[in-house]
Image (tube, coloured by chain):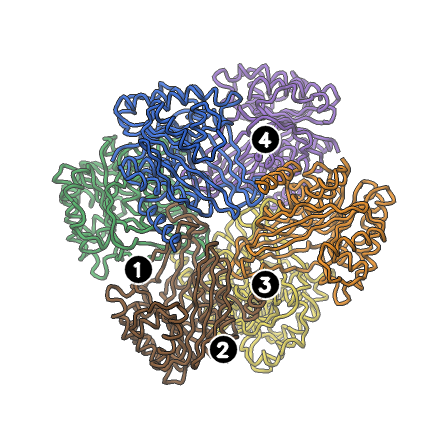
Chain colours: A orange, B yellow, C blue, D brown, E green, F purple
Amino acid sequence: MPRIAAFGEVMMRLQVPGVETLAQSSRLEYSFSGSGVNVTAALARYGHNGALITTLPETPVGEAAIAYLRKLGVDTSLIRRGGKHLGMYFLENGFGARPGRVTYTDRLGSSFNTAEANQYDMAALASRVDVLHLCGITLAMNDGVRGQMKQLAAEVKRAGGRVVFDCNYRPALWGEEGYAKARPHYEELLALADLVLMNEKDALYILGTAAADYDRITQLKQAIPAVAERFGIRAAAGTHREINADNTHSLTGYLYRQGTFAFSRKLTFPVYDRIGAGDAFASAIIHGELQEYPQQQTVEMAAAAAMLAHTIPGDTALFTESEVLRALSDFTLDVER
Amino acid sequence: MPRIAAFGEVMMRLQVPGVETLAQSSRLEYSFSGSGVNVTAALARYGHNGALITTLPETPVGEAAIAYLRKLGVDTSLIRRGGKHLGMYFLENGFGARPGRVTYTDRLGSSFNTAEANQYDMAALASRVDVLHLCGITLAMNDGVRGQMKQLAAEVKRAGGRVVFDCNYRPALWGEEGYAKARPHYEELLALADLVLMNEKDALYILGTAAADYDRITQLKQAIPAVAERFGIRAAAGTHREINADNTHSLTGYLYRQGTFAFSRKLTFPVYDRIGAGDAFASAIIHGELQEYPQQQTVEMAAAAAMLAHTIPGDTALFTESEVLRALSDFTLDVER
Amino acid sequence: MPRIAAFGEVMMRLQVPGVETLAQSSRLEYSFSGSGVNVTAALARYGHNGALITTLPETPVGEAAIAYLRKLGVDTSLIRRGGKHLGMYFLENGFGARPGRVTYTDRLGSSFNTAEANQYDMAALASRVDVLHLCGITLAMNDGVRGQMKQLAAEVKRAGGRVVFDCNYRPALWGEEGYAKARPHYEELLALADLVLMNEKDALYILGTAAADYDRITQLKQAIPAVAERFGIRAAAGTHREINADNTHSLTGYLYRQGTFAFSRKLTFPVYDRIGAGDAFASAIIHGELQEYPQQQTVEMAAAAAMLAHTIPGDTALFTESEVLRALSDFTLDVER
Amino acid sequence: MPRIAAFGEVMMRLQVPGVETLAQSSRLEYSFSGSGVNVTAALARYGHNGALITTLPETPVGEAAIAYLRKLGVDTSLIRRGGKHLGMYFLENGFGARPGRVTYTDRLGSSFNTAEANQYDMAALASRVDVLHLCGITLAMNDGVRGQMKQLAAEVKRAGGRVVFDCNYRPALWGEEGYAKARPHYEELLALADLVLMNEKDALYILGTAAADYDRITQLKQAIPAVAERFGIRAAAGTHREINADNTHSLTGYLYRQGTFAFSRKLTFPVYDRIGAGDAFASAIIHGELQEYPQQQTVEMAAAAAMLAHTIPGDTALFTESEVLRALSDFTLDVER
Amino acid sequence: MPRIAAFGEVMMRLQVPGVETLAQSSRLEYSFSGSGVNVTAALARYGHNGALITTLPETPVGEAAIAYLRKLGVDTSLIRRGGKHLGMYFLENGFGARPGRVTYTDRLGSSFNTAEANQYDMAALASRVDVLHLCGITLAMNDGVRGQMKQLAAEVKRAGGRVVFDCNYRPALWGEEGYAKARPHYEELLALADLVLMNEKDALYILGTAAADYDRITQLKQAIPAVAERFGIRAAAGTHREINADNTHSLTGYLYRQGTFAFSRKLTFPVYDRIGAGDAFASAIIHGELQEYPQQQTVEMAAAAAMLAHTIPGDTALFTESEVLRALSDFTLDVER
Amino acid sequence: MPRIAAFGEVMMRLQVPGVETLAQSSRLEYSFSGSGVNVTAALARYGHNGALITTLPETPVGEAAIAYLRKLGVDTSLIRRGGKHLGMYFLENGFGARPGRVTYTDRLGSSFNTAEANQYDMAALASRVDVLHLCGITLAMNDGVRGQMKQLAAEVKRAGGRVVFDCNYRPALWGEEGYAKARPHYEELLALADLVLMNEKDALYILGTAAADYDRITQLKQAIPAVAERFGIRAAAGTHREINADNTHSLTGYLYRQGTFAFSRKLTFPVYDRIGAGDAFASAIIHGELQEYPQQQTVEMAAAAAMLAHTIPGDTALFTESEVLRALSDFTLDVER
């Protein structure tokens, strides 16, 4: 099976168990995650070789991260070691009217964000990769990392590989200038991408068009094809989420390919841990596209994979294709009854 | 009772429970500590008002630190809030032939180490402080912090207060230049200090004299009085530690005052957690000096306080004067039998 | 009060705490259970002497099982020791769209399932038992255990005692032949039983009649009396469960006795741990029959006992009669409002 | 800001983690609470100086209580030490149809309940207090404590301070005589109080009028003004709670002041830990009154504070004013959508 | 085998896990113990029927105590229910120079200590008991309990049973009058006792003789026979403990019977939990006397049982006779090498 | 680097945390281990490709085992899936005079022990392996497994690889016939082996010679060369362990190669977890031989690796070569002082 690599940061997640706050508790549970981690781990469960390209420090914390990635089934042979720190964040669970809270430590000083471009052998990496996954959060870090993303994507294309780009535009990470600062970088990556994860907001930003007063679906159907055409993108996908009054969430997935939209059924379910659900959706879309599944099958499977990702502690979804299909069919039966 | 303030950093201690490594475990226990925390908390147990002067971020992590300090009995009213991060370190316990390990995160980017001098009202702070505690580890941080230490010490002296300085010279923190870089800063602080925690190595560094081939006690008796005379220091104190073949440690305390040395009995004991024992010793010396206890009584009590600090989880000793005296007398009885 | 004995296997339940999977976690919580354990423990709470007849290994695992049974209040004086192993199963909790999972270890090699008939003194056991409880899961094990069940039931009848049989037909345990293989064994036990736990599916299997296209209640009202008449069964009981859209469950109990059906109100409630609820229902039916409570009172109480069994961690319900009655009356009041 | 003191008992709360019973588990989590603790800790979060007046034993348990109070931000400088014990209670969580259970140990023998009046210097305490909080549960303890409450309230009034009284009439604590025994004590305290927490039941008891067949709001609007007028009370407040079929609760707060009622919107939310919500409401009312916020703003904020108190483990709400306002505005937005 | 009953209190032990103090931790582990619990549980492991005579409250705490006793194998059928509370104590482990601490709650208000004599049917209890165990700690409680002890012991003697009395004189429990107050009660019980656990200090108190300047063994050999003769005691036993410099303990057991002393070898071993070792020794002496083992065999076994009791968490030793014998023989081999 | 494969069983280790027994506790910690796991994981840390050849069930337990092996760094690509169970054992820690206990579940029914020879493609496996590790414990299982070991070893030799055999003769596993039954199988494997782990007892068994009355070193020097010559073994190695009075252990390693013995210094150290130390020694010997280190260097390093293996929870040593060398040099310095 093809080797899929993600270029991105590994962060240490330090979570207060239960619903206590940091000021109340004295214990933490830790794991390691990141968009690239989630995507390569999920694709490994689908039978692919999922490798991470990143930089981790040569410290006990770096060792712990690598052991954790191995446990997830991520291929760690492309990881370089160097720098001093790992990005970290503290997670306090909310309950009811009390929202959860995330507190970051100094992310920009991490091994990944301070690595220099010449420390990666981009051509050699590209030669070992069939599909490259990149994420808009990484793009927001700094000029060094942005340069590395573009260089690696260009090398992969040159070597005949494919590029997946998850827009994930987060205004807070781009400072006061916002999309004005982000735009040229997004455009460079969209021009290199074959498959893009984006929603109507991403598309409108890219097109520079204000959101019209239409509903989301109409906006989606207008903006996504326009973006795809402008940048020569083969396929685009994403989800719409609703949060219901009874604390359940509803998800609908969509997959646009060569002029046609496919929408999954709307899935409604309770939520244990929401983080990483978008990566689970993206992973299943990548899997479906690589397997050349029918468009409808791929989007249904991806929505079910995203739903399952809400049911498991930690950021990283750990489901085989057959588990995803079973969740989908159980759900369907339940609805039909 | 007088208000004793320490100027220093609060760090978050993230410890793997038991003897697993970070790569084996998935749980951490956290607390907050630092030399200033340990000293003010210990002095609070002796009945003084112990306040910390520091900067903590306005985040849930900063809130947790303040709540923890309050629990220790530290007066938190002089703490300013600002900056982004808290310094952190991971602690893995060793066992037998396997040494424990400490891994720091980015300490220089902490709220304390990035605060600017004009963010503290030095004169106002000095007016509320009778005794100021400073530590050589803080002195190693950066020029900003060094300037703040000197400015605050000078203001306290001007306002009629006293200054305690714990040399704590750590070569690794001063880079390649080592003591050549540290010397002018140490000399400035020694000139302001009334009571200094130092051992013969510190004294020889300060004097610029190589260690002669004498035993430690002889070195001590030569170097400490010379340093005290040169810088006008009223009293100096410290400990000698031996690690015994059966994993017990032995401590002997000394207190030099106006030409005379007093030595405690040598105390031998098993060790649960060694971190913070020096601060426990320093705290008891400060307490004894403030109470104007006889020199021998103060040094015996300080050695017993240091011994007790080895018996409790966490960096911070939490013993009242009567508990320290009981440990001292039990120990004595045991020896006499 | 009469001595009630159950003949059946004790299994060790190894549960991953929280909602992690076995591959994510590193901790387990263990307890010991089984249909016979659940029934005798529940009857002990109602004031009866509930004893278990089984075989447990003379190992630390066997010791732990016996200590656990004693804690539950089960009379352990009829347990023989021998063999090598205890049956075990791993339990991973599900969440939302992700189902829970049960993984068995080698059950057929357990001390109970490898014990030989002559290792029990059936006549002596029967002489100490007023009511014997047997379960269809045990019947599915192997010929040895089946023979022991029949022999013990026959001895108890001969000694003037009563036999309770819980059909609990599980197709998966009988292999490809299914009910064809099970039928003669079920018929032998039904002929010996005074009180039978069964639902309409069990009854239709026994009668060899295909399920007609009627609703469940109609099927029940046709099939149960027919079975009771054919085998001379004094009373039969069971529950109907519905799983609601909001994850609550609803239970309705029924008790058939001498030509008349009594139905409990339908109880609707949230679920913590579903395992063992059927045994809680059966226990309360046995208690009501032994106390000769009115038919309606018994079935209402049994439904409330089953409801409570869903609210407690572990397989074994631990409620006194007054706690069951309180739950019933609180529930009733709540409904009436 | 003014110093607010509460006179009341500190109790040790010993809670079985999860939903096991005391007979199933072997672990407890402990904290320290009480009406006065909850109110002063909450007011400290709003920026006031919140001090507790109580008696705690000079034992390790007493030390632990004081450390816990300090962590909460309670000013512990008015606490006296003496007596032998701390009141304690065990808490077992319920689930669904199984109610939670509270088991008290010997409360009347506690340091607080056995302290004698002359052990407090009432005049000195009163001179350091701007607002005094008292609670009807304390009033139910014994004659000694009742006398201390009245004496301290009178001293505070004499010194120009204000008195807040939370009726909290619990019939079970007053024995067979019930309100007949309680009445004279309630009347004395109401005569001293400026702000009273009470609902229509409390008011009807006080007025000696049977509940008419009106709805709760009508009863409230008739009885509260009558009580306020009779006893010269400046303001009165409380909440109405509804428990909904889906296990959510709904709260509506009211604040009566100078002839006018203000009602908060009805807030509906899931519940993690209900204990202490009334104290959170009372604290926000006190804060609003001290800040002289508009009546409607105070009651809305107090209802939101009570709602948040249901979302956090432990009895004591730990929210800043801005967190309360955010919960209120998020809730409002959510409702408007 | 004979039924051995102990009359005594059950206490709840609330232990801080690890070596943290109550002020540092937030978790407790609980169990239930007492001299009578320890002795009857140990004798149950030796194959006897060990029953406890006590009073426990009808609360969830009382339920938990009974379930725990059942798990230990104690016969709970002679326990009566009533009163309100259970005696409790908090246990903080020490380490090295820091001693462990025990903090009691209100013991005198416990169900056991407030039960009245007419609530036990002494004659009926005595008729079901072959050997009665009593302890000097119980004797120190109050006049009510003292009267019950004497009445029950007298009834057991009348019914032909034997009485074991463990002197366990604790000066702190008898107040200022000390042994002057205790003497008449000790004399009454010694006159009823067949087997007495005592050491030379107990014997000298009883004889009213000051400790001569002899070594412990000489004192023992003089005082024990004198006491035995005066009160007609058939056998007496006890241990001498030494605490060694390396934190190991050494125990030597002795058993006096009809004019002859037997001493065990001195056993030296590390200590996990010291509480309950004396009860383990007493239990093995009782077992040896009931089995009529040779005097030397009994005292060796009892010393080994006491040694093993130091190796297990909790107060109650849980070892079979064969485990004790194995520890003894392993130890012996080790010594002989 | 060469690929080293071990053929052997993976077992699930279920350990009671702390020093409680299975009957006292309710929690377990689990991990996965086995001689082959330990050796391949250790060699992976030394930079080799360490792969395991085994059979694991396709169940959640099997998934957890594979994830755990991946975390250890073991190459899992040669593992086949099938069968039903995993061998398991319970581990209770001892303390002082109380020995630890191991209780096995049904090992012979495990996936590994019930796999059939034709389910492995022996030739294909051999073609991917440079060094094969086999263990005498596996040889004791059953004829099927024995046949697979021999077949695989023969194929590896045919393909030009090397075979390492760890004698590990455990009399208890071979039943009443003992070495008479084991001999032909040992001889077949010794004839195929290049490097053998054995001690003087193993060698004497193999030679069929009774242990003479010589000391262990003399026996070793006589028997090992004789065995090596008879079976054409290139190198042999092992350790001598002493257990000291203060609970420390001492290890001396030896390595025999082409007529010459090298002995390590005797290392003395405290012990946390003894299981797996032999595998750590074997792994370092294999590494040294593959790297063609000097004989003395290899045996010193292997002894230090075995020492370190005693300091870490779990069976599997996780140390890099530089960590082993540091432990060796620290130890040496310590001794030289």
**Chain of the residue on which disc 2 is drawn:** D
Front label number (3 vs 1): 3
Q: Is residue F210 above or below residue E270?
A: above
Q: Which residue is mark 4?
A: F10
Front label number (2 vs 1): 2
Badge 2 marks a residue whose secondary structure is helix
Q: Which residue is mark 3?
A: D334
Spatial distance from mark 1 to mark 4, Cα to Cα? 55 Å
Residue A273 image position (x, y, % from top left): 60, 51
Q: Amino acid at mark 3?
A: Asp
Q: Residue at position x 81%, y 50% from top?
A: A119
Q: Which residue is mark 1?
A: D106
Badge 1 marks a residue whose secondary structure is loop
Q: Which residue is mark 2?
A: D295
Residue A108 image position (x, y, % from top left): 72, 59
Badge 4 marks a residue whose secondary structure is loop
Q: Residue furthest left?
A: E158
Image mark for residue A98: none
**Chain of the residue on which disc 1 is drawn:** D
Q: Are marks 2 and 3 on the same chain?
A: yes
Q: Is residue E71 above or below residue A251?
A: above
Spatial distance from mark 3 to mark 1, Cα to Cα? 46 Å
Q: Residues within 10 Å of mark 3 (few under 14, many from 20)?
A: few
Position of F106 with respect to A15 (left or right) is: left
Spatial distance from mark 2 to mark 4, Cα to Cα? 70 Å
In the foreground, F216 or C312: C312
